[in-house]
Image (cartoon, rainbow, N blue to C red):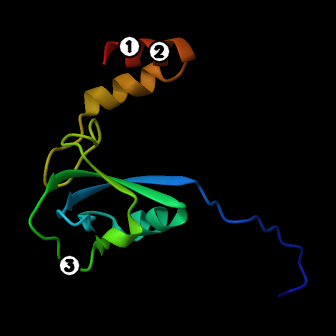
Amino acid sequence: FDGADRLAVPALRPDVSVIACREADPDGNVAFGRFAFTDRLMALAGRALVVQVEQVVDRVTGADTLPAFLISAVVVAPGGCSPTAAPGFYPADESAIRAWMKAAKTPEGTAEYLEAL
């Protein structure tokens, strides 16, 4: 626009996007329950979408939802966001996050941490 050189790269298009949401209904519709803007972008980026939810409810409603036809699979995994927070369900576990950050500095530390789970 102004004559200056610009750098452009193609958009990322992962085979699978995985996001965590608050809840799903039996039909597979999901409610974000947190940062709908960024999660929606991540959800729509992949060719397939897997959503982890904390619970199944009779019906999800509201503007912060994704319809079932966009979702490849729903995984009901209460506590699945741990050690990070799931607002309305549980807080972040700061000590567990610190332990992971320390362990993840080396391949050996990562292996030991995952083995202990």
Q: Could you say whether the residue bearing mark 3 is in a helix, strand or loop?
A: loop
The residue furthest bottom is 1
What residue do we see at 43% from left, 58% from top? 49
Q: Could you say whether the residue bearing mark 1 is in a helix, strand or loop?
A: helix
The amino acid on which the numbered mark 3 sits, given as a three-letter code, is Gly
> Residue 115 shows which numbered tag?
1
Q: Could you say whether the residue bearing mark 2 is in a helix, strand or loop?
A: helix
Spatial separation of the CA atoms under disc 2 and disc 3? 41 Å
What residue do we see at 52% from left, 11% from top? 108
* Label 2: how many Cα within 10 Å (few below 14, some 14–19, many 20+): few
Identify the residue position indicated by label 2 in the image: 111
Dividing the image into 4 quarters, which one contains the C terminus? top left
Verify CB contact (< 8 Å) between mark 2 and mark 1: yes
Left or right? Give the position of 64 relative to 71. Answer: left
Q: Position of residue 27 (x, y in %)?
A: 22, 66
> Residue 73 shows which numbered tag?
none
The amino acid on which the numbered mark 1 sits, given as a three-letter code, is Glu
**Of label 2 and label 3, which has the lower sequence position?**
3
Identify the residue position indicated by label 3 in the image: 62
What residue do we see at 44% from left, 63% from top? 43
